[in-house]
Image (cartoon, grey):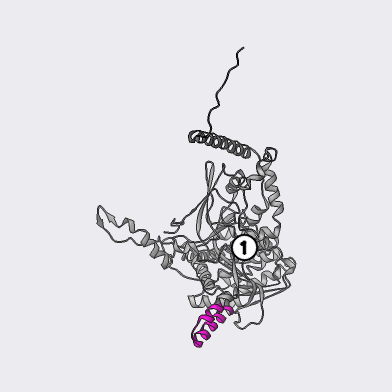
């Protein structure tokens, strides 16, 4: 049998190199495709430590049984018809300001309509934002004008029966986030400004209990304080807080300091911006740790929170190095003296602080430049007394709110500048071994979670983005609108092909949660919908 002789083909030509590269790239493509297919066929972890830490959402808040029983007992002998009428009056007063559009939002609304200024080539005037009138629940023919109520005994009873449960649920949500992300914190002294029926005492009792050595409630309404004192007396067997006192006014020269100062639904009751500013200064000067501000989730309520945030940003502490440069570079002693004096005034008010929640940054709020506003929602189970006073047929209620938690001290430094990585984004050298790659999805995620200690996760959570809207679930991907640590609103896209773990977590994430995963795609996007026009 004759042997065949094959000539050796040359391999050093440009054409051969291109063919070789093409074959290698196709081979690499199919390897990655196969790896992704294997990854997405394996089970994902449920409820990782980072996801649990970032979860703010509570499906439904239920008031403690002792609190419901004591409240019902206290209201048992009250006139039910008057209670119903006064409840409607309170709801009318709240609804009367729900659709008020702040002036800066009105201007943005008019500018946003500029593209519609021409019809068939003819210019027309800018349309002004139209706000639908709100009609009274007591008389549906009467359009409500913005107004506030003075709380006497009747109004205080009605507030306790109808509004108190939703107020409790919102404060409970905020306190739970603080207790989760700062597990070692327990407020020994609490100041509740605008306390109503001791609104902050009851959720604080659930989280910190006997660690609270003093609670001071302040409310300008003496009848409301009488209701609060009566409720505390009825609940004394279940309350663990020790020293509980109430007063009508807050002294501006008080020497007492508190670990936590709370102002819930109070800034909106003040009559001027100057009064709100001086109140913020007073409250901030009396806290050694947390200042909690809560308002209703309306354009006006969010504006008061935004104004408070702007005030603190404007008084942010100047780093010592920059202060020194400013003082050294000044050519005049008078300028030096003025700069130093202004700096000292700023430090007296603000010291050094960071926004604990909801903001992951200390920059200008990105929603201030849009038509929307920062707010969240909480559901509460209505007690029987609330259902009767509101004539409600459903035993649950959703309440929107805006809030800001400010804490003294600098923002905690990050143990890592990156959010939680998906297995696919890890170093490729670690996944070259095929045997190891078979277990990459679960084992690497578990190892990552074990390596990230509780303290590390807590530090990293200060830079995690927060959901500004409910996630938008699509086929094979999820769109998430977040406020990120760089001070922008972003739309992040999590796909099933990128990481099955992040895709699954993105489908489960809720409005208001912190979300630690890195997306496949990030788009800087202004949230431009008009929720109230």
- Which residue lies at the image location 66% right of the left edge and 77% below the top edge? 257
Q: Main secondary structure of the magenta part?
A: helix
Query: Residue 518 in the image: x percent, y percent?
Result: 58, 51
Crowding near the residue tagged with mark 1, few <14, some 14–19, many ≥20 C-alpha atoms within 10 Å? many
Relative to 245, residue 395 above or below = above
Which secondary structure, mark 1?
A: helix
**Between 120 and 89, which is closer to the camera in this rendering?**
120
The residue under label 1 is: 174
**Between 161 and 416, which is closer to the camera in this rendering?**
416
Instruction: Give left or right: position of 363 versus 380.
Output: left
Magenta residues span: 323-347
Image quarter (top left, top right, bottom left or bottom right) of the C terminus: bottom left
- Which residue lies at the image location 27% right of the left edge and 54% below the top edge? 119
Q: Is residue 129 visible?
A: no
Query: Residue 150 in the image: x percent, y percent?
Result: 52, 73
Relative to 504, residue 135 above or below = below
Query: Residue 21 in the image: x percent, y percent?
Result: 53, 37
Image quarter (top left, top right, bottom left or bottom right) of the N terminus: top right
Count the marks.
1
Point out the residue furthest to the bottom here: 334
Relative to 452, residue 403 above or below = below
- Is residue 381 within the magenta segment? no
Point out the residue furthest to the top here: 1
Query: Residue 93 in the image: x percent, y percent?
Result: 49, 67
**Between 61 and 65, which is closer to the camera in this rendering?**
61
Quadrant assignment, res 216: bottom right
- Is residue 336 within the magenta segment? yes
Q: Is residue 237 visible?
A: yes
- Which residue lies at the image location 55% right of the left edge and 24% below the top edge? 7
């Amino acid at each position: 049998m004759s042997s065949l002789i094959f000539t050796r083909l040359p391999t050093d030509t440009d054409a051969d190199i291109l063919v070789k590269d093409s074959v290698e790239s196709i081979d690499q493509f199919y390897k990655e495709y196969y790896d992704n297919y294997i990854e997405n066929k394996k089970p994902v972890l449920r409820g990782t430590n980072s996801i649990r830490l970032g979860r703010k959402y509570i499906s439904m808040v239920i008031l403690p049984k002792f609190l419901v029983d004591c409240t019902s007992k206290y209201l048992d002998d009250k006139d039910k018809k008057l209670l119903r009428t006064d409840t409607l009056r309170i709801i009318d007063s709240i609804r009367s300001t729900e659709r008020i559009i702040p002036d800066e939002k009105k201007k943005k609304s008019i500018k946003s309509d500029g593209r519609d200024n021409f019809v068939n080539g003819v210019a027309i005037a800018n349309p002004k934002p139209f706000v639908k009138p709100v009609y009274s629940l007591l008389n549906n023919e009467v359009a409500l004008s913005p107004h506030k109520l003075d709380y006497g005994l009747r109004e205080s009873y009605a507030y306790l029966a109808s509004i108190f449960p939703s107020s409790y649920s919102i404060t409970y949500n905020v306190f739970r986030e603080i207790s989760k992300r700062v597990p070692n914190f327990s407020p020994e002294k609490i100041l509740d400004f605008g306390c109503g029926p001791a609104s902050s005492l009851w959720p604080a009792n659930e989280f910190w209990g006997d660690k609270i050595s003093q609670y001071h409630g302040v409310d300008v309404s003496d009848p409301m304080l009488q209701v609060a004192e009566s409720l505390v007396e009825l609940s004394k067997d279940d309350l663990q807080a020790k020293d509980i006192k109430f007063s009508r006014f807050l002294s501006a020269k008080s020497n007492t300091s508190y670990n936590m100062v709370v102002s819930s639904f109070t800034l909106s009751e003040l009559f001027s911006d100057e009064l709100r500013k001086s109140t913020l200064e007073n409250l901030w000067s009396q806290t050694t740790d947390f200042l909690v501000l809560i308002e209703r989730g309306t354009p006006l309520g969010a504006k008061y929170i935004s104004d408070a945030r702007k005030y603190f940003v404007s008084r942010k502490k100047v780093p010592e190095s920059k202060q020194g440069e400013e003082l050294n570079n000044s050519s005049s002693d008078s300028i030096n003296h003025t700069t130093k004096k202004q700096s000292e005034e700023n430090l007296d008010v603000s010291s050094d602080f960071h926004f604990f929640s909801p903001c992951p940054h200390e920059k200008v709020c990105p929603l201030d430049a849009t038509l929307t506003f920062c707010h969240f929602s909480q559901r509460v189970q209505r007690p029987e007394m609330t259902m009767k006073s509101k004539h409600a047929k459903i035993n649950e209620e959703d309440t929107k709110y805006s809030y800001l938690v400010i804490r003294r001290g600098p923002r905690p430094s990050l143990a890592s500048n990156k959010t939680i990585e998906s297995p696919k984004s890890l170093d490729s050298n670690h996944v070259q071994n095929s045997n190891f790659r078979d277990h990459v999805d679960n084992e690497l995620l578990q190892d990552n979670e074990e390596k990230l200690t509780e303290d590390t996760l807590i530090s990293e959570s200060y830079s995690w983005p927060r959901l500004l809207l409910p996630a938008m679930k699509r086929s094979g991907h999820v769109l998430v609108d977040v406020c990120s640590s760089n001070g922008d609103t972003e739309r992040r896209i999590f796909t099933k092909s990128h990481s099955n773990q992040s895709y699954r977590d993105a489908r489960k994430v809720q409005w208001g949660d912190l979300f630690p995963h890195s997306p496949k795609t990030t788009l800087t996007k202004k949230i431009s919908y008009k929720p109230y026009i």
